[in-house]
Amino acid sequence: MKDAADIGVTVTVPAPVEAVFAVLADGWGYASWVVGASRIRAADADWPAVGSRIHHSIGPWPLLLQDTTIVVAVDPPKLLVLDARLWPLGKARVRFDLVAAEGGTLVKMTEAAVTGPLAVLPVSVQDKMIAPRNRESLNRLSRLAEANARDERTTGSEEE
């Protein structure tokens, strides 16, 4: 059985912590990297402040499920904790930990159902079920952060 340190998916993103957090801090961009998210219907102007929300749609059109994700905790640029709701399936706690590492940023994403039918499963079982999806989400986030960091370097060098 996995212990808490083994739960979740970790990737190294070849971009600075600030570039990775910038992707997380763009509420309107979540549908471009979160697997299964179809669109963002609205994002609070103060996202990712604690209590702010994004209103999302999940699934293929026209069978969209509509709900919200709320920020539970944030410590830029190293931590973001979200409660992602998806009625009727319940709510999941999603945590992103970012640490500067050799060659970029170590990003760990953990997710566990806290309400709804999946919450009765042990977290280690939930983790096995959701890990492939979360790994792909982090791969997409990585590509966006890399592109943003590259754009920053290009823009910064042009201004000098």
Image (tube, rainbow, N blue to C red):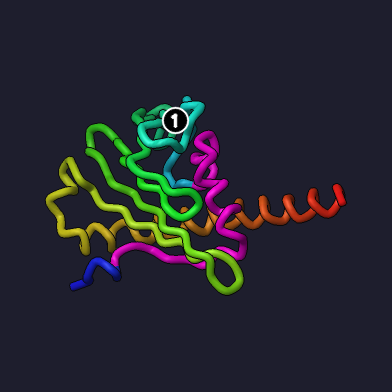
Between 74 and 86, the one lying in front of the other is 74
Residue 68 placement, left or right of 113:
right
Residue 89 placement, left or right of 77:
left
Q: Could you classify mark 1 by the number of other residues whose Cα lies within 10 Å: few (under 14), some (14-19), or many (20 or more)? A: few
In the figure, residue 88 lies in which quadrant? top left
Numbered marks: total: 1
Tell me where residue 84 appears, x and y as whole percent: 33, 40
Q: In this view, does 88 lie above or below 81?
A: above
Residue 106 placement, left or right of 70:
right
Tell me where residue 85 appears, x and y as whole percent: 30, 36
> Residue at position x 41%, y 54% from top?
96
> Residue at position x 44%, y 40% from top?
37
Quadrant of the drawing holding the N terminus: bottom left
> Residue at position x 56%, y 58% from top?
17
Q: In this view, does 143 lie above or below 55?
A: below
Tell me where residue 67 appears, x and y as whole percent: 34, 29
Q: Does the magenta stretch include residue 105?
A: no
Residue designated by label 1? 61
Q: In this view, does 33 lie above or below 27?
A: below
Q: Is residue 22 magenta?
A: yes
Over which residues does the magenta segment extend? 7-33
Between 126 and 82, the one lying in front of the other is 82
Q: Which amino acid does label 1 sit on?
A: Trp
In the figure, residue 14 lies in which quadrant? bottom right
Tell me where residue 108 appears, x and y as whole percent: 41, 61
Between 84 and 137, the one lying in front of the other is 84
> Residue at position x 29%, y 70% from top?
6
Q: Tag 1, which secondary structure?
A: loop
Q: Which residue lies furthest to the left in this view?
A: 120
